[in-house]
Image (cartoon, grey):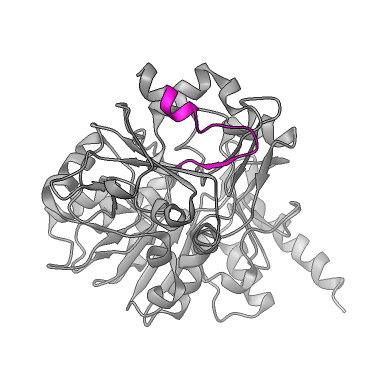
Amino acid sequence: MANALDTIWREFQPGRTIYLPGATGESLALASALGGDPERAAGVHLLSCLVPGMNEALDYGGLAADGTATTFLLPGCMRESFKRGQVSLIPRTYWGIAQQFQATRCDVAIAHVAPPDANGLCSLGIASDFAPLIWPQAAVKILLVNPSMPRLPRALSLPLADADVVVTLDGPLVEAAPAASNEEVEAIAAKVAALVPDGAHIQTGIGGAPGAIWKYLRGHRGLVLRSGMVNDWLLDLRDAGALAEDARHLAGIAYGTRALYDDLAGSDLVGFATTFETHGLPALVALPRLTSVNGALEVDLFGQINVEWQGAALSSGVGGGPDFMRAATFSPGGRSIIALPATAKRGTLSRIVARLDKPSVGIARSDIDTVVTEHGVAELRDKGMDQRAEALIAIAAPEFQAELAEGWRNLRATFR
């Protein structure tokens, strides 16, 4: 490994901007090596789309005192370097990130790939999302070949011949931890699943209620995956006969267990594409019955959504949810769903609030459609301001409903 790393380190020169793959494209072996020798990042600017919960192995912004990083979501491990001003957090949706990467010229781009096939093509394996977009503009192209990366039949590939540097570095892949659930999450998931029609093109976010709906979709038929990612649940739906036959299931990354990755390598169940295709509005709005299911931290009575702030702590970024939410509301027969528990902090804090008091709003009220808590479903798309507030108060936890109603009356009295 030492020789392989030396080859990479020669490209880590002060003043350079270096793209590193994030999400499940992250090389944990390279992250470990950087963490053990952080001064390699001295004077270097690292560029990536790192994802909270997935990419928590290394604070890429805080490796060296004069190192910096740009990302679009903020993993928890990078909060301290963000506070110090070493991290630039750009508030763009995934489709916007794709546009930015395609237009970015960086000094070095690293792609994490499977070993080449007989034609000299290196599969991007479980992450086709961004690497093909930034790769053509890089002055120096590094293929990081990982023998543990599976070659998925319809993942995108990069030609071995295009690389300036080819390095073999074996290491584990990013895998999803077992999903936690509880009575509230299960109740929300069941309500969400009841809103999903047969024949839907379906997208979900990570964890919580969005990640739990799949067990309640086993009785559906004709479902098609059209999402930023594919998880282990798709295999359950396939085995239950819930998926459309000969459908074009599409995702940008796979995020699950090694068993999922091995199954996808052998089954050719899912095609993979860049974020331009998975999150681009022109392609998404043409899909019939596009149903997006995403989580949130708070929703206020105007329909504004907080997806970034936990108290005063910035805990994420805008993400891909808004892309799918906007597309779903324009899709023929489509629906956008925000699914969240009605309370936080063991029931002491309502997630339905009169008005957001956070520094920024992640999703505008113009993009909201349907909100689901364990207490019910609020249909907001065609409702006026007062009717929205009433619908959201009705699905808040009962112990907070009177306070919310009073808060709305007080707000309403200030309108001119």
Classify 234 as above or below 87: below
Taking the spot 81% from the left edge, 66% from the top edge, the residue there is: 411
Q: Position of residue 195 (x, y in %)?
A: 36, 68
Closer to us: 5 or 356 = 5
> Was residue 10 drawn as part of the magenta stretch in this picture?
yes
Quarter holding the N terminus? top left
Q: Position of residue 265 (x, y in %)?
A: 16, 45
Quarter holding the C terminus? bottom right
Instruction: State which quadrant residue 217 falls in.
Output: bottom left
Q: Which residues are magenta?
A: 6-21
Q: Position of residue 236 (x, y in %)?
A: 19, 49
Taking the spot 66% from the left edge, 52% from the top edge, the residue there is: 400
Instruction: State which quadrant residue 79 falls in.
Output: top right
Answer whether residue 372 is visible to the viewer in this image.
Answer: no
Instruction: State which quadrant residue 104 falls in.
Output: bottom right
Classify 332 as above or below 230: below
Taking the spot 19% from the left edge, 60% from the top edge, the residue there is: 219
Taking the spot 54% from the left edge, 31% from the top edge, the residue there is: 12
Answer whether residue 337 is visible to the viewer in this image.
Answer: yes
Classify 133 as above or below 71: below
Q: In the drawing, does residue 399 fall left or right of residue 257?
A: right
Question: How many labels sit on residues?
Answer: 0
Closer to us: 332 or 185 = 332
Q: Position of residue 145 (x, y in %)?
A: 30, 35
> Was residue 184 drawn as part of the magenta stretch in this picture?
no
Closer to us: 110 or 73 = 110
